[in-house]
Image (cartoon, rainbow, N blue to C red):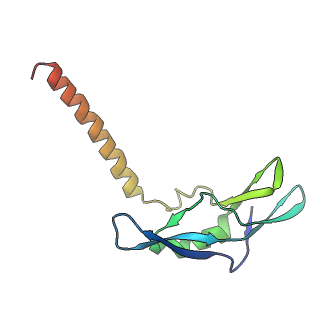
């Protein structure tokens, strides 16, 4: 587990969110402490790099970073670690509606190509 330093999370605007009129935000700065092999370390790196948040999820993501964050260490260099929230997708950091629409659209395109190929192949 990692302990996010209170007050160290700083957000900055990250441009417009696709399909909305809202600005996105990215985590510009964060500091966290973690232990590896009994030694204490501090880091400021985060996964995924350039993670963009929707305007309405800022408070939730900050709360989850302070509660659930985990440090992933480089075994060859324990002083190098990255912070992430396990199961970030299950916690709502992406829109499941967006995922469902993308999958449905992909299936529709593939099905359409097969139907068109079958129609053209039958001499239609």
Q: Residue at x 46, y 74 (%)?
A: 55
Query: Dividing the picture into quarters, in which one does residue 39 lie?
Result: bottom right
Q: Nearer the viewer, residue 59 or 25?
A: 25
Residue situated furthest bottom in the rendering: 7
Q: Position of residue 88 (x, y in %)?
A: 56, 58
Q: Position of residue 4 (x, y in %)?
A: 71, 71
Q: Is residue 18 above or below residue 12?
A: above
Q: Residue at x 49, y 62 (%)?
A: 92
Q: Residue at x 56, y 62 (%)?
A: 50
Residue situated furthest top in the rendering: 122
Horizontal relation, residue 87 to residue 31: left or right:
left
Q: Residue at x 58, y 55 (%)?
A: 87
Q: Nearer the viewer, residue 11 or 37?
A: 11
Q: Quadrant of the N terminus?
A: bottom right
Q: Quadrant of the C terminus?
A: top left
Query: Dividing the picture into quarters, in which one does residue 33 lie?
Result: bottom right
Query: Dividing the picture into quarters, in which one does residue 85 lie?
Result: bottom right
């Amino acid at each position: 587990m990692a302990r996010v330093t209170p007050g160290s999370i700083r957000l900055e605007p990250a441009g417009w969110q696709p399909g909305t009129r809202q600005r996105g935000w990215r985590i510009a700065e964060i500091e966290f402490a973690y232990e590896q092999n009994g030694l204490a370390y501090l880091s400021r790196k985060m996964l995924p790099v350039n993670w963009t948040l929707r305007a309405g999820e800022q408070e939730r993501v900050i709360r989850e970073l302070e509660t659930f964050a985990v440090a992933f260490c480089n075994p060859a260099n324990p002083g190098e670690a990255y912070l992430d929230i396990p199961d970030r997708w299950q916690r709502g950091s992406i829109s499941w509606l967006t995922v469902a629409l993308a999958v449905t659209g992909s299936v529709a395109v593939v099905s359409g190509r097969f139907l068109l190929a079958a129609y053209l192949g039958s001499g239609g």
